[in-house]
Amino acid sequence: MRIFAWLGAATVMSCMLAPPVLAQTTRFDGNWSVEVVTQQGACDRAYRYSVIIQNGQARYGGPEQFNVNGRVQPNGSVSASISRGQDRANVTGRLSGNNGTGTWSTSGGRVCSGNWNAEKRG
């Protein structure tokens, strides 16, 4: 009988804890406008990307042939890559509220690096 009472209490507690955990992983979900600025190297001076975050996963939201693959942790930490063909940029940074900042650097053909800024649009 004690085991059933313990399992019941554990089930109730897990149900009570689940919504805040889900809220933590989805609080950055939405449409983001990301400006990527080159600080070093022969890459174009600036780019702007539409990025969609859903359940903490980032993906490209525009019509061009860019691939955005990344993850936003519940604390806002960002780790991602942006690629097109053989060109690839590795991205790190942090989101906080409706804004974000970080750095990026390329791997592959062109050697470039810089920073990025993001703003949540919805």
Image (cartoon, rainbow, N blue to C red):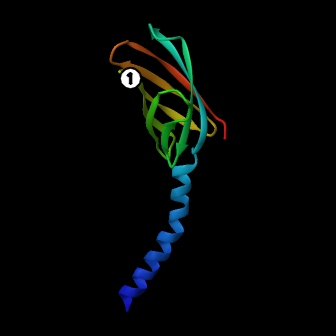
Q: Nearer the viewer, residue 46 or 92?
A: 46
Q: Is residue 42 above or below residue 7?
A: above
Quadrant where the N terminus lies?
bottom left
Q: Hey, which quadrant is residue 117 in on the image?
A: top right
Q: Which residue is mark 1?
A: 85
From the viewer's side, name the closer residue of 33 and 95. Answer: 33
Quadrant in the rendering for residue 33: top right
**SS class, disc 1:** loop
Q: Is residue 108 left or right of residue 76?
A: left
Q: Nearer the viewer, residue 59 or 70?
A: 59
Question: Which residue is found at the position 54% from the left and 11% from the top?
Answer: 45
* Extreme residue in the right direction: 122
Where the C terminus falls, by quadrant? top right
Question: The residue under label 1 is which amino acid type?
Answer: Gly
Q: Specify whether 23 is left or right of 68.
A: right
- For the view shown, which residue lies furthest in the left direction? 108
Query: Badge 1 local density, few (<14 within 10 Å), some, or many (20+)?
Result: few
| Picture residue at 55% right of the left edge, 50% below the top | 26
Give the number of marks: 1
Residue furthest to the bottom in view is 1
- 17 over 1 or under it: above or below: above
x then y, percent, for residue 5: 42, 86
State the image coordinates of residue 101 (x, y, percent, origin top left).
Answer: 55, 28
Residue in the picture at 33% in, 18% down: 108
Q: Where is 119 relative to 26, above or below?
A: above
- Horizontal and vertical percent position of residue 79: 43, 35
Q: Residue 25: x and y, percent?
A: 51, 51
Question: Considering depth in this image, is 6 or 104 the residue closer to the camera?
Answer: 104
